Amino acid sequence: MTNFNDNFERAMELPMPARTFAKLNAAGDFVSLTVRPGLINKHVTAEQLQVLAQLADEAAVKYSAGHSFIVSVEQQKLEAVVAKLTAVGLYAIQPGARAVVKCCDFCDGDRLEALSFARELLQQIEQLPMKKRLRIGFNACTEACYNAVRDDIGLVYHNGYIDLYAGAVQMGRRASSGTLWKRKIPEHELLPLLQNILSDFEQSDCKTFAAFVKRGE
Ligand code: SF4
């Protein structure tokens, strides 16, 4: 019989990490990379796990609340590490303030109606430098199971139209979902609109996107 009790007891030892980004960075010069199996795919291959295992041996790897691994990398090894990640198809987001698009997994590739739009969105917006990291959730159907409405900007696709949610507060005691800002935006109108929103936020004196949205209400 499968022994889940032993498994639970082992987990209840509550191990704490010996190496974290903070500890490593206090002793050296480290950066932290956000790493994902792909822009849409969420399955990890054996060779990707081998690369992550090697990086965990050298420094630290943890997983985050944002569907990503956080990989600590010594600054002087960054170029070599990114080349290793690229070789096995692991996607790396540069450190720093950028727009980051978090896509759902398109039902593991079974629902691809929104793929060409998502490709355009990623090409235009992903990793755009911003004053602050801005999370843009893209969910490819109205089930929105990847919680786009909890991101700074949530995009929910349906039959060639997108509902845009904005203003979520992701952390803290006042955490809340974004509100529906605009409904049924045709695909061809979404990108120019989004670029205008990002540019207006950049030029505003608002520190957070939620404050920017609140001011516009
Ligand atoms: S949001 Fe829709 S298309 Fe995307 S993974 Fe969830 S159910 Fe599938």
Image: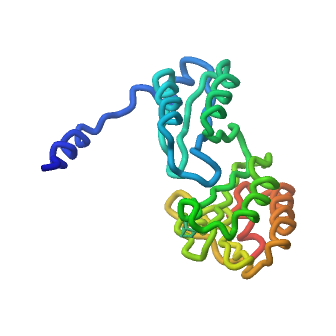
- In the image, residue 31 sits, relative to residue 205, either above or below, namely above
Residue furthest to the left: 1
- In the image, residue 188 sits, relative to residue 3, either above or below, namely below
Residue 17 locus on image (x, y percent): 39, 31
Give the quarter the ligand 1 occupies.
Answer: bottom right
**Numbered disc total:** 0
Q: Residue at x 49, y 61 (%)?
A: 173
In what quadrant of the picture does the C terminus appear? Answer: bottom right
Q: Residue at x 79, y 53 (%)?
A: 123
Q: Quadrant of residue 185?
A: bottom right
Residue furthest to the bottom: 184
Q: In the image shown, does 178 or 139 lie closer to the viewer?
A: 139
Query: What scheme was used to colour the molecule?
Result: rainbow
Q: Residue at x 60, y 35 (%)?
A: 88
Q: Residue at x 53, y 29 (%)?
A: 51
Relative placement, left or right, of 179 versus 129 is left
Q: In the image shown, does 89 or 196 lie closer to the viewer?
A: 89
Residue 156 locus on image (x, y percent): 65, 72
Relative placement, left or right, of 192 versus 171 is right
Residue 146 locus on image (x, y percent): 54, 64
Q: Quadrant of residue 25?
A: top right
